[in-house]
Amino acid sequence: MNKKLVAALSGGAVLLMALSGCSGGDDSDSKVNDWAKKVCDQVQPQLSKIAGANTSIQQATSDSSKPAEVQRTDSAAFQSISEAYRSLGAAVDSAGAPPGKEGETTQQEAVKELNATSTAYAGLKTKVDALDIKDQAKFADGLKDVADELDKLSNSGDKALRQLQSGDVGKAMAKQPGCQKPSATGGSAAPTAAGSES
């Protein structure tokens, strides 16, 4: 029904912590490794939750899906993604500041970003819930708006997360199995622009 939604999703929701083993160098700093482990142990279940929600949206977005079914699936998926980002924010928050210069600022910015993303997905859920499923054309238009917002969301605001994942802390996180991207989606981690969907 709406390929654009799927395209936006495949790029977006796992902009997060997709640290596909860019591990290199020798990390002798056990403080950094301990911090990374503390965060990453809590990250994996959330990444799996997000990947599962993405998959359910992709499955419901086939041309034969009824609007009510798409609405129900998308709503549940956005709720799930919103909760996952909130949990990720809590994980980074409870781990404390990562070792290193600007650690506290980096941590606070990342938590703020994760919480804002959580709120944005909750907003998408509200939007999807409000769509008119009795009028297919209106519903499709509404979904297109949701896809546009999702696209914006996936292309913005992960600056603090990138900061969190840079330097020694990033290397340490990349080595933790919990912070590596679930392999459910396969393919490259690079987001695809929704517009390039033919």
Image (spheres, grey):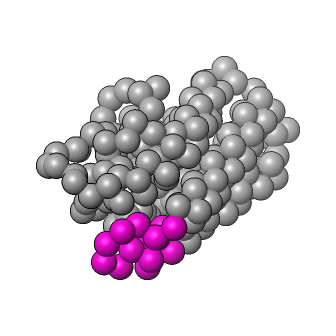
Query: Which quadrant is the C terminus positioned in?
Result: top left
Q: Is residue 21 left or right of residue 70?
A: left
Q: Is residue 51 left or right of residue 141?
A: left
Q: Nearer the viewer, residue 189 or 4?
A: 189
> Is 155 situated above or below 66?
below
All told, the count of numbered labels is 0
Q: Is residue 193 left or right of residue 124?
A: left
Residue 99 in view in this figure: yes
List x then y, in percent, for residue 90: 62, 60
Q: Nearer the viewer, residue 160 or 54?
A: 160
Residue 148 in view in this figure: no
Q: Residue furthest top?
A: 64
Tell me which residue sits at (45%, 32%) in the image: 182
Q: Nearer the viewer, residue 165 or 196?
A: 165
> Is 104 situated above or below 145?
below
Query: Which quadrant is the N terminus positioned in?
Result: top right
> Is 134 situated above or below 86?
above
List x then y, in percent, for residue 98: 41, 66
Residue 133 is inside the magenta segment: no
Span of residues in magenta: 96-110
Q: Residue furthest right?
A: 134
Tell me which residue sits at (56%, 71%) in the image: 112
Tell me which residue sits at (41%, 62%) in the image: 161
List x then y, in percent, for residue 33: 35, 52
List x then y, in percent, for residue 129: 80, 48
